Image (cartoon, grey):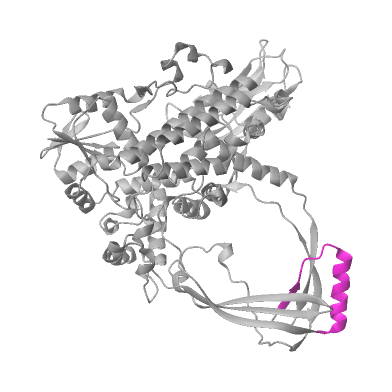
Amino acid sequence: MKLVIAEKPSVAQSIASVIGATKREDGYLEGNGYIVSWCVGHLVELAEPGAYDEKYEAWRKSDLPIIPFKGNSDWKYQVTSGTRKQYAILKSLMERDDIESLVEATDAGREGELIFRLVYNQAKCKKPFERLWISSMEDEAIRDGFDNLRDGTEYDALYEAALCRERADWIVGINATRLFSCLYGQTLNVGRVMTPTLALAVEREASIRAFKPEDFYTVILDCDGMHLCSERISDKTEAEKLMEDCEKAGDVRITKAEKKDKQEKAPLLFDLTSLQREANKRLGYTAQQTLDYTQALYEKKLCSYPRTDSRFLTEDMEDTVGKLLGKIEESHGFKTSAQQYISNCLNSKKVSDHHAIIPTVQITEKNLLELPKGEQEILKLLCLRLAEAVSGPCKYSETVVEAECAEHLFKAKGKHINDPGWRLVGITVEEDEDEADDGTISIDVSENQTVKILKANTKTGKTTAPKSYTEDTLLAAMEKAGADETPDEAERKGLGTPATRAGIIEKLVRIGFIERKGDKKTKYLVPTHKGEALITVMPEAIQSASMTAEWEQRLIEIEHHSYDSRKFMNDIETLVTNLVDTYEIIPDAEVLMKPVYEPVGKCPCCGSDVVEKSKGFGCSSKECNFILWKDNRFFDSLSKKITKSVAESLLKDGKVKLKKCRSVKSGKTYDCTVFMTVNEKEQAQFNICFDAGGK
């Protein structure tokens, strides 16, 4: 018997159905010489510092740095508390006498390797294992994978890199978090990738605040079919004088007139990061939502493996692409350009572990309308991109005209699309603003020609600050961070990996270092006061994007046997030790760290400001006990929370109108008005009125 271990139950079920393990048991499936079971994420994790010495239970700067491998002590692991039952099942299966070998079927990547190996080692299993390495959950791909199982030892270097990543994150996270939390008197989470990512957002907001808008002026000359524009002029009087001088001159002399035929190549296929960026730009999805939707499609056999950093397919997939294009036209109506360029998508040298994300032929065998909306939209993007990627280039003519008038240079630029090529594929998809034509020049001109000016006027503009990061632009910044210092031949650059970037952003939001602001269409990722304070006191070594990007490249080199993992870990130890030994607290940091609370109203008990805190809206006076808890039992019974706007209404008017409340018992919805009174113990009490007028 062979024991197959997948990463998730859904993946295990797909594999089991293909290899004939159809008999259901508690925590596994059995049949046809196989037992198929699964992990549930990470079943085994690094132990807390207290497992090494009880003194580490308390956070003290004097105990730092905590380096488990210092002095040749072994790293300690523990079974995750919430998954002990499944771990016990896997351990017992590994110990069965009829299990001769294992098949590692966790996700084919660094983290999947780590998940399996930690369980295998924790269970002290010594049985041989093979590796299933597939990029699609289609039945044919699974069968082919089992026909070509690889020896598990081929992936020892991948496991070694995964251990280095996990342990480096532990060392930096534990030591830096404890160091800064002890020094500044509050919990300040620090991470090897998380903190440099936060630093990007903080730096962007600092640039926005420091930006001072300035007026500028341009002179526009209407030449009947061509609008010539001057360079920016900072002085309004100077611009108006130039306009008058041009009106007096009456014409311009053409100094340059060029018309060139150009073409814009079709976009590359999606890797995970580019898919997340496109989904955020077009659909407003967060990086995590896009990953979740794509992972669900993968498990439903509708797309290939999502956690990839490649934007190409292997050269032996040419026939597969041809079949897929017919399926895409059938399922979504996307037609390629008249001439196809499938070879543009094929480059085996640029595919390492997994090829680009593409739909599978299964898309015509399932009712796609039964999919959740998010999965439908992501699948549509994948189909559209494949059809675009194999289409011809967009061919256009670009005209550039330069002219001279009143001793000033004027320019005009026009663009005319001759053959839309790949752009015609997505004609039903709303085009982005930056894809619009630059305008046209409807008159033919040549050098040294004189052209009459019909009208001259000035146009006022204002310089604009950079925008806060969106999910799209922050992912791009993470991908490019430190790229200038990374060698050109590096396979992967930036902060984190395509598989981890979404999780980093979500963690920054969850622990209160970044918040999402904006409307439904555009959400900006803005650092909180706590996030900005952390970066202000953080040394360059920890918040440096280039250093973290270099570490990520070292992990890739470890995977490829070209860098020593011991040197990598020694470098991490040196960094953390130097940080603990040399860091000095920032003067007056207690003022910097103190949260800034904005008043939301006046206290009904003492008249002091009521301010928003993490768990509620409380009186700023230490002598007063008044508070409106965000999680309030009365409002819970209405299926509502006390939000900032609700608190403002209660404090101002003593009441608030609520719409679409829902009874917890009956499930019925209704509108009502809630009234607030305060008792002698300075506690808020609420009453409800069901009529629309609130009387």
Q: Foreground: 108 or 578?
A: 578
Residue 257 picture location, percent across and down: 67, 83
Task: Specify whether residue 660 is in view.
Answer: no
State which quadrant residue 334 falls in: bottom left
Q: Residue at x 33, y 66 (%)?
A: 329
Query: Where is 575 relative to 311, above or below?
Result: above
Q: Foreground: 686 or 27?
A: 27
Q: Foreground: 639 or 415?
A: 415
Q: Residue at x 27, y 43 (%)?
A: 154
Residue 264 picture location, percent across and down: 50, 71
Q: How many marks?
A: 0
The magenta region covers 227-251
Q: Residue at x 40, y 54 (%)?
A: 310
Task: Specify whether residue 147 is in view.
Answer: yes
Residue 592 picture location, percent across and down: 71, 28
In which quadrant will I find the N terminus?
top left
Residue 2 picture location, percent across and down: 15, 36
In which quadrant will I find the C terminus?
top right
Q: Foreground: 105 or 516?
A: 105
Q: Is residue 438 magenta?
A: no
